[in-house]
Structures are given as C-alpha cells and as structure tokens.
Image (cartoon, rainbow, N blue to C red):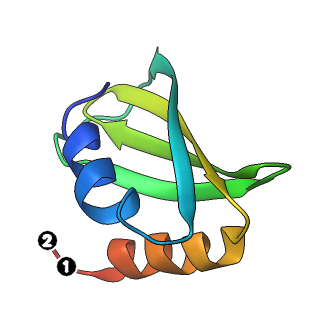
Amino acid sequence: MIKGLKDFLEEKISSLDFVEGIIPGEIKVGSATGENLVVKYKYSTMSGAKLIARSGSSIQEVFVITRFPDRLREVIENLSDRPG
C-alpha cells in the first residue's frame, strides 16, 4: 500500500457505517511529485466505488464496497476540501 493510505483508510473510511469492505488495488508509478497523500473519488461501480490515491510518484486504486457510493463521495470530497 502506498505511503499513508493504510492509516487514511482505517481512520477515515473503514469506520463509516455504510462501508462494507475495502479492497486495495494495483499500485502504479506516476509522474507527479509531492509526499502528501491525496485521495479522490473516481466513479461508482456495481459494488460501490473506486477511489484513486496518490502519494509521491505512486498511484493506487482502492475499491470500496458500499450500497451508498454517493455518501462515500460526499465524505471523500469533504475530506479533500480540508486544509492540511
């Protein structure tokens, strides 16, 4: 798992009552730089949602199992709007 992602998922996502499971996906190397973890909602899937996490030059897919992907999108967007 890319740097900081495990803590983010455990602290911010897995504790949500509408999240049934989390499946970390493939890690790829991107061209971006920077050390801060950034997690974005990508799209809804049949079983929930796909997130994209970036840290440094690494990119990782994360699949979240939920019947409420719109609620998850709101949480992710609110977390990314916060400074720091």
Foreground residue, 36 or 34?
A: 36
Quadrant of the image for the C terminus?
A: bottom left
Task: Say what amino acid the circle numbered 2 marks.
Answer: Gly
How much space separates mark 2 and mark 1, taking CA atoms?
4 Å
Left/right of residue 41 with respect to residue 43 in the rendered view: left
Kindly identify which residue carries mark 2: 84
- In the picture shown, does residue 52 fall above or below 41? above
Asked which secondary structure carries label 1, the reply is loop
- In the picture shown, does residue 38 fall above or below 71? above
Report crowding for label 1: few under 14, some 14 to 19, many 20 or more residues within 10 A (C-alpha): few
At 19% across and 41% down in the image, what residue appears? 4
Image location (x, y in percent) of residue 20: 57, 54
Image location (x, y in percent) of residue 41: 58, 59
Image location (x, y in percent) of residue 55: 28, 37
- In the picture shown, does residue 46 fall above or below 3? below
Q: Which mark is residue 37?
A: none
Task: Say what amino acid the circle numbered 1 marks.
Answer: Pro
Report crowding for label 2: few under 14, some 14 to 19, many 20 or more residues within 10 A (C-alpha): few
Foreground residue, 4 or 20?
A: 20
The answer to whether marks 2 and 1 mark residues whose Cβ atoms lie closer than 8 Å is: yes
Asked which secondary structure carries label 2, the reply is loop
At 28% across and 41% down in the image, what residue appears? 5
Kindly identify which residue carries mark 1: 83
Quarter-wise, where is residue 11 in the image? bottom left
Foreground residue, 30 or 13?
A: 13
Quadrant of the image for the N terminus?
A: top left
